[in-house]
Image (spheres, helix red, strand yellow):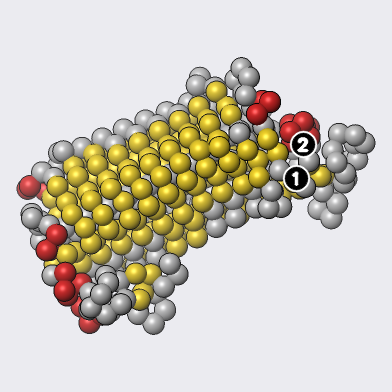
Amino acid sequence: MQEAGIFEGGNGTPDDPFLIATASQLDKVRRHMAAHFKLVADIDLSEYKKGKGWDPIGVFIKKAPFNGTFDGNGYAISNLTVKRPGEDYIGLFAYTGKNAELKDITLKDVTLTGTESVGSLVGENHQGTITNCRASGSISGESLVGGLVGCCNRGVVRGCRFSGEIKGKSRVGGLAGGNTLDAVIEESHVEGSVTGKEEVGGLVGWNWEASITVTSVEGEISGESYVGGMVGKSTGIITESYARVQVSGGYYVAGLVGWNQNSNITDSYAVGKVAGKDKIVAGLVGWNRESSITNSYFGGTIAGFERQTGGLVGYDFDGDIVNSYYCRDYIKQSNSYGSSRTEEEMKKRGTFEGWNFEETWDIQEDKSFPFLRWE
């Protein structure tokens, strides 16, 4: 597989990957979609800013995803620019398949514009694995727009981060626009702003039959409907995660999840400010349908439509809310979902019946609300 002069070295095998030291060499990855690559220098993609900018690697339409491995090796790729507002699958990689492994990649000063499946690293990750990658910049599109991945479909995203600004219309998230069908996002963090119209979340816009665990969000999240500090709409699992956010929207608005259906939320919390202009507004979950909320809390303020505003949950339909709380000193109006406690009580370990303070939670007695031990 060796191509003299094209790469810095290597044969493209797992033990002897192609070595990439220049922007031109990075552009030639598309010639070997199942090979193995490693960066050996920082790369500046400024020379690819002209016209539509960078041409994403991997093609969905021709069923030609990137199925190799790419090791960033601690080096950074800067000034990735894509200006393709009428095109889908936008990112450094357009589409990654089930054998793809992307790891230790850093993207700095990213500027992307696309339509559907837009993310700084990958437009759509289909069954691939992304580990320890981070990106910063500005991302915009219409649907399935995320800071790192447009849509993670049956794939894994682990130990990743995004900081910056995300804008879209539907299914917009700080890390991924969509997390779908047994996909996993874990040990990841977002810091910045996320703006959209519907299904807007600080981490994920649309969590469909997928899982999110040990994740966090800090920033401002705004939309019109199905807006959450962590997830806009969820039919999956959320565990050991938190959102420190300011969330604003119209209806189905909450600090953690805007709409929660056939889903489980465990050992998670949200703090900050939640504001909704219409109905179904709450601190933790806006609409909770046939879902469970266990050992979780909201510690912040709420402003919303008075009849359907909740300190913990806006409206519950056949759900199960267990050992979950909100601070009533911070909230002027609320319903009966969840348990209310004073600020003083929220700072005492004894308040939180059934919580695991040995392995999962911690608290500074009389000084802080509970926090997760992994923080």
Image quadrant containing the C terminus: bottom left
Tell me if label 2 and label 1 are in contact, CB under 8 Å. yes
Label 1, residues with CA under 10 Å away: few <14, some 14-19, many ≥20: some
Label 1 element class: loop
Give the label on residue 41, or none.
1
Q: In which quarter of the image is residue 296?
A: bottom left
| Residue type, numbered disc 2 | Thr
Q: Quadrant of residue 329?
A: bottom left
Name the spot of residue 127 as percent of width and height, x first.
Answer: 59, 48
Name the spot of residue 199 as percent of width and height, x first.
Answer: 34, 39
Report the residue at 63% width, 19% height from top: 50
Above or below, 69 relative to 368: above
Give the label on residue 22, or none.
2
In primary-sequence order, the first of circles 2 and 1 is: 2
Residue 180 visible in this rendered orientation of the protein: no
Name the spot of residue 67 as percent of width and height, x first.
Answer: 70, 43
Could you give the CA–CA distance between mark 2 and mark 1, rounded to whole angstroms? 7 Å
| Residue type, numbered disc 1 | Ala
Label 2 element class: loop
Q: Is 16 placed left or right of 163 in the picture?
A: right
Report the residue at 35% width, 80% height from top: 357
Image quadrant containing the N terminus: top right
- The number of discs equals 2
